[in-house]
Structures are given as C-alpha cells and as structure tokens.
Image (spheres, rainbow, N blue to C red):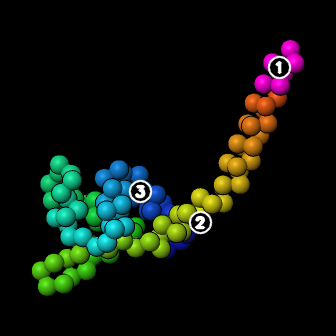
Amino acid sequence: MAESDQLSGIFSALADPTRRAMLARLAGGEASVTELAEPFEMSLPAISKHLKVLERAGLITRGREAQWRPCRLEAGPLGAAASWLERYRMFWDGSFDRLDDHLRAIQKGKADG
C-alpha cells in the first residue's frame, strides 16, 4: 500500500471519537470486544464495525485465544502518521514565532504611542 493510501486509512480511522477512545483503551493493554464496548451505548455489531475500520487501517490486530478474541494496539501506523505530521511542525512553529513577533510589535507600538 502506498504511503498516502495508508495515511488516508489511518487518518480516516482516527477521525471518529469512538475509535480514538478504543485506541486509548488499548494503549493500556489488550481487551476483548465486550470490554471495548462497555463505555459506549451502541450495539456489538456497531462496535465490530468500528473495530474493522481500525483493523483495516492497521491500528489494531485481533487474536484468537480459545473463545477469547483479544484486540491489541498496533502502534506502527501511528508512528507513520506522527512522522507525516512532524514534517509540518516547522511550519507551525515558524507561524507561531511570526505571530509572537507581530504581537510584540503591536504592544510596543501601543506603549510608544
């Protein structure tokens, strides 16, 4: 899969607050589908759809241990998204620096005026 296609899947999966909450829960360790569903007022089929989106994006894996199907966070794709965002941090930092300079100039002008 091309990087842009992978990133599209990752960012699309992260766009939903329910899926972000599921990932946050999995950051603390593996969990069953039932455990992941507990804080949400939705059906298990709806939870399963969210998990499929996360799985397609490569953000989770689902194992099989007897009757238990644990979900696990896969942090690698999050690293890819973070690396992509990092490319723009210099732009953001520069923009904030220019804004700081501008605000200082305005305040200095008021003090001089």
What amino acid is found at the position of numbered circle 1 in the picture? Ala
Query: Is tag 3's residue or tag 1's residue first in the polypeptide sequence?
Result: 3
Q: Which residue is mark 2?
A: 83
When the figure is inspected, residue 82 is found, relative to residue 88, above or below; the finding is below
When the figure is inspected, residue 113 is found, relative to residue 53, above or below; the finding is above
Is residue 57 at least partly visible in the picture?
yes
The structure residue drawn at horizontal position 87% and vertical position 18%, both measured from the top left corner, is 112
What amino acid is found at the position of numbered circle 3 in the picture? Leu
Query: Is tag 1's residue or tag 2's residue first in the polypeptide sequence?
Result: 2
The image position of residue 105, as x and y in percent, is 82, 29
Q: Which residue is mark 3?
A: 14
The image position of residue 14, as x and y in percent, is 41, 56
The secondary structure making up most of the magenta span is helix
Name the element at disc 3: helix
Q: Which residues are magenta?
A: 107-113
What amino acid is found at the position of numbered circle 2 in the picture? Ser
Give the spatial CA distance, label 1 vs label 2: 43 Å
Answer whether residue 112 is magenta in the image: yes
Is residue 60 at least partly visible in the picture?
no
The structure residue drawn at horizontal position 20% and vertical position 70%, both measured from the top left corner, is 32
Q: Which residue is mark 1?
A: 111
Query: Is tag 2's residue or tag 3's residue first in the polypeptide sequence?
Result: 3
Quadrant position of residue 88:
bottom right
The structure residue drawn at horizontal position 37% and vertical position 56%, both measured from the top left corner, is 20
Give the spatial CA distance, label 2 vs label 3: 15 Å
Name the element at disc 1: helix
